[in-house]
Amino acid sequence: MEDFYRLQRRLLLATGLVALISVPIVAVTFNLSVAGSVFVGACAGLLYVRLLARSVANLSEQSRGLGRFQLVVPTLLVVGAAKLPQLDLLPAFLGFLLYKPALILQHVFDS
C-alpha cells in the first residue's frame, strides 16, 4: 500500500504542476477569464483524481467495484459552467482533463 500512496502523491503533484504551468500560459495566450475557467477545471480534476484514488484505496475483497461518487465532480463542473456566466465550458473541461498529461508523464518517468 505504501507504493500506492507514493504513486498517489506523485500523481497529485504532477497534476498540480501541469495546472500551474498551463494556467499562466493560457492567461498570456488568451485572457484571464479563460485562464480562470481552466483553473477551476484543473481544481475539479485534482478533486476527481483524489476521490478516485480514495475509492481505489478502499477496494477490498467484499467490495464489488469503484464508487460512483467521483462522477459527481465532472457533472457539477459542466452544470456550473452552463449556469455561471463567468465560466466557459470548453476551457473548464480542458482544465479538468489536465490530469491526463500528468498520468502520461508519470508513466514516462516510471519507465
Image (tube, grey):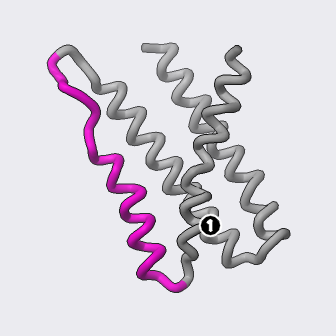
Residue 49 or residue 5, whichever sits in front = 49
Q: Quadrant of the C terminus?
A: top right
User: Dot 1: within a 10 Å radius of its alpha carbon, few (fewer than 14), some, or many (20 or more) residues?
Assistant: many
Q: Residue furthest right?
A: 28
Q: Quadrant of the N terminus?
A: top left
> Which residue is under mark 1?
91
Q: On the rendered structure, is 52 left or right of 39?
A: left
Decide: is 86 above or below 80. below
Which residue is at a point 15% across and 19% down the rendered structure image?
Answer: 62
- Please give the range of residues in magenta: 62-85
Q: Residue furthest left?
A: 62
Q: On the rendered structure, is 49 left or right of 90?
A: left
Q: What x and y, as percent, mark residue 101?
A: 66, 40
Which residue is at a point 52% across and 29% down the rendered structure image?
Answer: 8
Decide: is 98 above or below 50. below
Disc 1, SS: helix
Q: On the rendered structure, is 20 left or right of 39?
A: right
Q: On the rendered structure, is 26 left or right of 59?
A: right
Magenta-drawn stretch, dominant element (helix, strand or loop) = helix
Which residue is at a point 65% across and 23% down the rendered structure image?
Answer: 107
Decide: is 55 above or below 17. above
- Residue flagged by tag 1: what amino acid is it? Pro
Q: What x and y, as percent, mark residue 42?
A: 58, 55
Decide: is 87 above or below 103. below
Which residue is at a point 34% across and 50% down the rendered structure image?
Answer: 71
